[in-house]
Amino acid sequence: MIVTFFGSPGSGKGTQAELAAEALGLAHVSTGKHFRREIQRNSALGTEIRDVIEAGKLVTDEIVNELVFQLIDEIPGVLLDGFPRNVFQAGSLDEFLLRKKRKLDGAVFLDVPEAEAVGRLAGRRHCTSCGAHAFFSDDTCNFCGAALVRRTDDDPGVIHRRFEEYRLQTAPLEAFYAGRLVRVDGIGAVKQVHSRVLKAMEPWL
Ligand code: AMP
């Protein structure tokens, strides 16, 4: 099975994608997570994309497409998180899968109103040690006790830019995936949304 998850920044896409992948035994391929790891490692790719990500802009289609196609080639069960991010990437993914005699089973759109998502991002912290990515109320990680930091791209100024990119580039995916898209209400507790996601994905199992 190959499915993709998309939603605005702060929609809970990363958390829900990770939970769904684990529940369904799929490989969780998160482009954002991959890029943040490369930046932390100071690799050549990390150095190339650091400024783009920290400004809340999108990495070029060439870099992302090549990365994803390499990562998913030969893996039968994949849950894509954060890719495709625009219609060009979505078309390239369809073409790539067709060449491999595979197809995208469907897209999950995690629907959260912008005001709610902006509020969530303002309170979001990220663990410097285990990488947990959640909404914590204190300064230490609930999972491993290490220090929490705000993602550079969760800075209030950058959030604004990420929403602009989302509206312009990613929101049109709703129309692109018409007929193979399920919309999931992203408001509520993590567990509650997770159950909705699994239910929505049932037809693809
Ligand atoms: P995310 O963790 O999905 O919010 O991604 C964090 C950042 O990584 C985004 O704001 C982009 O700068 C970059 N990124 C992740 N996925 C993509 C993609 N498919 N296309 C372009 N840029 C991406």
Image (cartoon, rainbow, N blue to C red):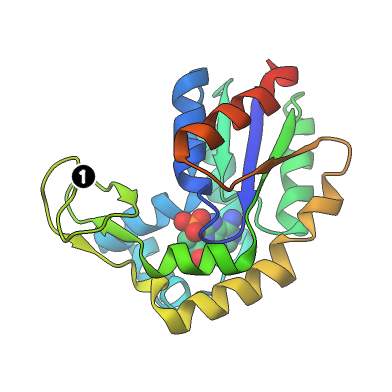
The mark tally for this picture is 1
Please tell me how crowded label 1 is: few (under 14), some (14-19), or many (20+) other residues with Cα within 10 Å. few
Side of 56 relative to 102 (left or right): left
Q: Quadrant of the N terminus?
A: top right
- Label 1 CB, ligand 1: below 8 Å? no
135 is higher (above) or lower (below) than 50: above
Q: Residue at x 69, y 19 (%)?
A: 202
Task: Answer with the quarter of the image where residue 94 lies.
Answer: top right
**Could you tell me which residue is drawn at 57 percent across and 51 percent down?**
82
Please provide percent x and percent y for residue 156: 43, 80
Q: Residue at x 19, y 40 (%)?
A: 143
Nearer to us in this view, 182 or 190: 190
Q: Quadrant of residue 45?
A: bottom left
Q: Residue furthest top?
A: 205
Q: Is residue 116 left or right of residue 46?
A: right
Q: Which x, y percent locates residue 158?
A: 47, 79
Q: Which residue is mark 1?
A: 130
**Residue 59 place in picture, x, y as percent:** 54, 66
Find numbered disc 1 in the image and state the secondary structure of the residue it sits on: loop
Taking depth in this image into account, of 142 and 56 the one nearest to the observer is 142
Q: Is residue 68 above or below residue 49?
A: above
Spot the residue most to the front.
Answer: 188
Query: Is residue 27 in sight in this rendering?
Result: no
Residue 49 in sight from this viewpoint? yes
Whether 42 is drawn above or below 23: the answer is below
Residue drawn at the location 69% of the way across and 28% of the way down: 200
146 on left or right of 64: left
**Depicted 105 relative to depicted 181: above or below:** above
Q: Quadrant of the C terminus?
A: top right
Dot 1 amino acid type:
Cys
